[in-house]
Image (tube, rainbow, N blue to C red):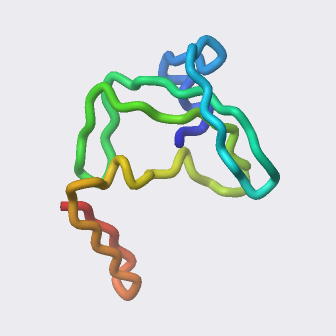
Amino acid sequence: MVNVGLLTTIGYDPSLAPDRVQVTTGSGVEYVPRLAMSRIKALGQERTNFSVLGHTLPPSASIDGLLGLDFMRGQVLNIDFAKGRVSLN
């Protein structure tokens, strides 16, 4: 899931997305746009032609998006709380 503001900044227009997906959030059920990004990179991994959901995330969250299991599938995720590190191999 990627913040719609960021998607707009990098040239995607969520309002023109032909596909919408039902998502259950803490405040209820919403329909959000699904867009195919040409490329996305996070935690040292890169995906091409990867679908993301656009959603307005609260400014207090201080994040640009959330990685889902579809991004991590087939990889090993390590979370080290003591060292404050996350890695995806």
Q: Determine the image quadrant of residue 15.
A: top right
Q: Is residue 51 above or below residue 45?
A: above
The residue most toward the right is 27
Res 5 visible: no
Which image quarter holds the C terminus? bottom left
Q: Residue at x 34, y 73 (%)?
A: 85
Q: Residue at x 69, y 50 (%)?
A: 24
The answer to whether residue 69 is left or right of residue 61 is: left
Res 9 visible: yes
Q: Is residue 32 above or below residue 58?
A: above
Q: Is residue 73 above or below residue 33?
A: below
Residue 72: where, in percent of width, then height?
31, 54
Q: Is residue 28 above or below residue 30?
A: below
Q: Residue at x 47, y 34 (%)?
A: 52
The answer to whether residue 42 is left or right of residue 52 is: left
Residue 38: where, in percent of width, then height?
33, 22
Residue 14: where, in percent of width, then height?
60, 21
The residue most toward the left is 89
The answer to whether residue 82 is left or right of residue 34 is: left
Q: Nearer the viewer, residue 78 or 6?
A: 78
Q: Determine the image quadrant of residue 29.
A: top right
Count of marks overlaid on the render: 0
Residue 48: where, in percent of width, then height?
26, 29
The answer to whether residue 18 is left or right of residue 28 is: left
